[in-house]
Image (cartoon, rainbow, N blue to C red):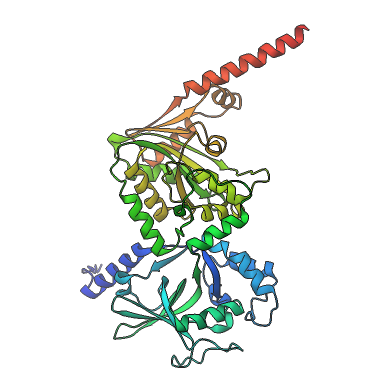
């Protein structure tokens, strides 16, 4: 029998593996809030795993997805209206093009980009297929550090005539564009050429405030400020937000936060698992005394606009700690089925860390807000009772007297939920814990019902 011993990987192989791992860590969920969606290359977007929603938007708008947008009447404008909010909840992963990642870019890499750019050779009507000669074809240019970045695109997939006008404007003065594309080449001198799949202009603060004013039908809540209308999906405004938050890190006050999820992208108990897993990562064992609840989140406005619901859910004086914004939550209320997990007992620093790790590990995660039970919408919409209590290295599954009686009447095996969590190995022990306050409230309610029934029988 011959035995071949595999030697250690070569230095080149190890370097390639390290580079791939570093780029993988740099990959993030790409989402964007556009004021205008200027280009969507439908045939090439179809190669992405997340393309079904875009294709569905095209069909709904009446577009022929096999033909460029020109000559399809009003359908492209309707497509932009439908698809614009879709990109706010997309879960496509791409490497964010920054100075550090630009050094490692290679052909075929899916990247996201945002910068002020100029357009060279802006497209002329009628829009034509690219020639493949950069000196003749329209393209966007900008720099990242010492790297020159060129974004090429097929002008036939510009969505509207306004997009063409915008590109002509950017030939005279740089405009900010955001989007995703694949790296087509990297020259020996380091010039990066990207073939665009999607790009548009990020929504500005002034545009967001104007949209809110158009949609709002009731008075604004106290504490609503310009920060509630920032574009948290824009790289420049996101960094500003993080700076504001970091000033408050280190505070010892404990608070509750609500984590929002896209309910259509999760399986049963998936939110429970991901929240408790990430809590075990960010909160030291000796500091754990945390309450966790999970529920569906229904914004039933009774005629109140989604923009007003979002504003009254997020605004308070003094300001709530949050990653969500009014325009962002407005879109979620209008277009998504939402679920929520409330977590109590976190410090400010732990809340920030939990938000960051949820963004990295849970594609269904949408953002968070500090909980204030004195706010009417928080009191009405957020779960009032916990499902889990984490104490040190122990997980306690919370029950009430009525819930336990119902489970026993249905013949439920009460060891099964405990065994599921024991098998996951996140906690040293898993036990039941009764919510005595809730049990007492249920007993009072039951007593009142029985008393009313007996009084009715005696009459």
* Residue 303 drawn at (x, y percent): 68, 46
Question: Between residues 348 and 188, which one lies in front from this camera angle?
Answer: 348
Residue 152 vertical placement versus 230 (above, below): below
- Residue drawn where x is 43% and y is 44% of the image: 319
Question: Between residues 319 and 327, which one lies in front from this camera angle?
Answer: 319
Question: Between residues 49 and 376, which one lies in front from this camera angle?
Answer: 376
Residue 5 vertical placement versus 454 (above, below): below
Q: Quadrant of the N terminus?
A: bottom left
Write down the quadrant of residue 442 in the picture.
top right
Q: Left or right of 337: which side holds 372?
A: left
Q: Quadrant of the C terminus?
A: top right
* Residue 263 drawn at (x, y percent): 55, 49
Q: Left or right of 247: which side holds 80?
A: right
Name, please, the residue furthest toward the top.
Answer: 458
- Residue drawn where x is 57% and y is 65% of the image: 84
Write down the quadrant of residue 42 in the picture.
bottom right
* Residue 137 drawn at (x, y percent): 48, 89
């Amino acid at each position: 029998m011959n035995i071949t011993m595999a030697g250690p990987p070569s230095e080149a192989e190890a370097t390639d593996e390290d580079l791939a791992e570093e780029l993988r860590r740099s990959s993030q969920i790409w989402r964007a809030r556009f004021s205008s969606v200027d280009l969507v290359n439908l045939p090439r977007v179809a190669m992405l795993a997340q393309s079904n929603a875009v294709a569905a938007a095209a069909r709904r708008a009446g577009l022929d997805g096999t033909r460029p947008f020109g000559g399809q009447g009003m359908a492209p404008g309707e497509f932009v209206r439908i698809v614009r909010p879709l990109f706010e909840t997309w879960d496509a992963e791409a490497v964010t093009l920054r100075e550090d990642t630009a050094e490692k870019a290679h052909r075929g890499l899916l990247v996201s980009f945002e910068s002020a750019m100029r357009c060279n050779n802006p497209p002329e009507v009628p829009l034509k297929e690219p020639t493949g000669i950069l000196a003749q074809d329209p393209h966007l240019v900008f720099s990242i550090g010492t790297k020159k970045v060129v974004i090429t695109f097929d002008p036939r997939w510009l969505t509207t005539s306004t997009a063409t006008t915008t590109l002509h404007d950017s030939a005279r003065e740089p405009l900010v564009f955001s989007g995703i594309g694949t790296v087509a080449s990297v020259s020996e001198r380091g010039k990066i050429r990207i073939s665009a799949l999607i790009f548009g202009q990020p929504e500005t603060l002034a545009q967001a405030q104007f949209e809110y004013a158009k949609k709002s039908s009731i008075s604004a809540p106290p504490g609503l400020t310009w920060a509630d209308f920032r574009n948290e999906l824009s790289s420049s405004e996101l960094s500003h937000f993080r700076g504001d938050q970091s000033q408050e890190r280190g505070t010892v006050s404990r608070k509750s936060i609500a984590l929002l999820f896209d309910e259509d992208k999760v399986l049963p108990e998936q939110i429970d698992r991901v929240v408790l897993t990430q809590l075990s990562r960010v909160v030291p064992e000796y500091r754990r005394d945390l309450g966790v609840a999970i529920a569906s989140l229904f914004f039933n406005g009774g005629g109140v606009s989604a923009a007003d619901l979002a504003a009254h859910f997020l605004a308070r004086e003094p300001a709530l700690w949050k990653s969500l914004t009014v325009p962002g939550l407005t879109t979620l209320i209008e277009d998504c089925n939402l679920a929520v997990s409330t977590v109590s007992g976190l410090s400010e620093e732990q809340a920030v860390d939990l938000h960051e790790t949820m963004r990295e590990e849970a594609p269904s995660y949408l953002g968070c807000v500090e909980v204030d039970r004195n706010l009417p919408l928080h009191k009405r919409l957020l779960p009032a009772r916990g499902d889990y209590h984490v104490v040190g290295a122990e997980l306690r599954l919370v029950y009430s007297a009525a819930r336990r009686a119902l489970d026993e009447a249905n013949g439920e095996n009460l060891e099964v939920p405990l065994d599921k969590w024991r098998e996951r190995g996140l906690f040293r022990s898993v036990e039941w814990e009764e919510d005595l306050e809730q049990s007492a409230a249920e007993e009072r309610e039951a007593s009142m019902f029985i008393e009313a029934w007996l009084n009715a029988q005696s009459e």
